[in-house]
Amino acid sequence: MRHRKAKYKLGMGTSQREAMLRNMVTSLLEHESITTTDARAKALRSVADKMITLGKRGDLHARRQALEVIRSKKVAQILFDDIAPRYANREGGYVRIIKKGFRPGDRAAVSLVELVEKKAEPTKEKGATKRKGLKDKIVDTFKSTK
């Protein structure tokens, strides 16, 4: 019986599952959103939350613990410098899972996994020029010939 065995097995061995989750959490922290299957997304959520919690602690021991899981020093630097300060006032729940539908090849349920508070993207200014399409160029040419 599997009573009180709260871990997603995902149909693979322990070392393969841990390697996959390490790669996925590294990609999630680097890109701030990834697409994967529902079961993998649910397994990823706990690992990602633990990494962000380590980032919030911010001490040397937490950095070394995070580097045991995260595959890239650059991504660990991003975690401790950019991502963790965004969640300073948040107690948990750093990852959002949005169901997207089904994958065409095998009908596997697919989800979007993203960080709750994304990086603020620069907004367009009001007076910014938009790219002219072919129709606009033709109209401008017609007006200039008159």
Image (cartoon, grey):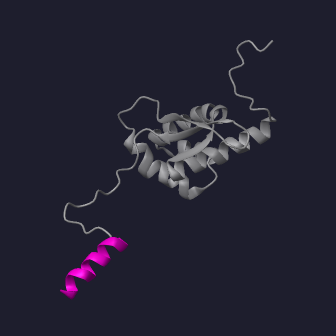
Question: Is 105 left, or right, of 123 in this rendering?
Answer: right
- Mainly helix, strand or loop, the magenta region? helix
Q: Is residue 132 visible?
A: no
Residue placed most toward the observer, 73 or 32: 32
Total count of labels: 0
Q: Which residues are magenta?
A: 133-146
- Residue 136 belongs to the span the image colors magenta: yes
- Residue at 47% across, 48% down: 80
- Residue at 61% across, 48% down: 70
- Rendered-image quadrant of the N terminus: top right
Picture quarter containing residue 86?
top left
Q: Is residue 13 visible?
A: yes
Q: Is residue 19 above or below residue 126?
A: above
- Residue at 58% across, 56% down: 73
Question: Is 102 left, or right, of 54 in this rendering?
Answer: right
Question: Is 10 left, or right, of 25 in this rendering?
Answer: right
Picture quarter containing residue 35?
top right
Q: Residue 100 location, x and y as percent?
A: 55, 37
Q: Residue furthest toward the bottom?
A: 145
- Residue 55 belongs to the span the image colors magenta: no
Residue placed most toward the observer, 33 or 136: 136
Q: Residue 8 location, x and y as percent?
A: 70, 28
Q: Residue 95 location, x and y as percent?
A: 50, 36
Q: Is residue 100 above or below residue 5?
A: below
- Rendered-image quadrant of the C terminus: bottom left
Residue placed most toward the observer, 58 or 131: 131
Q: Residue 3 location, x and y as percent?
A: 74, 12
Q: Is residue 35 above or below residue 14?
A: below
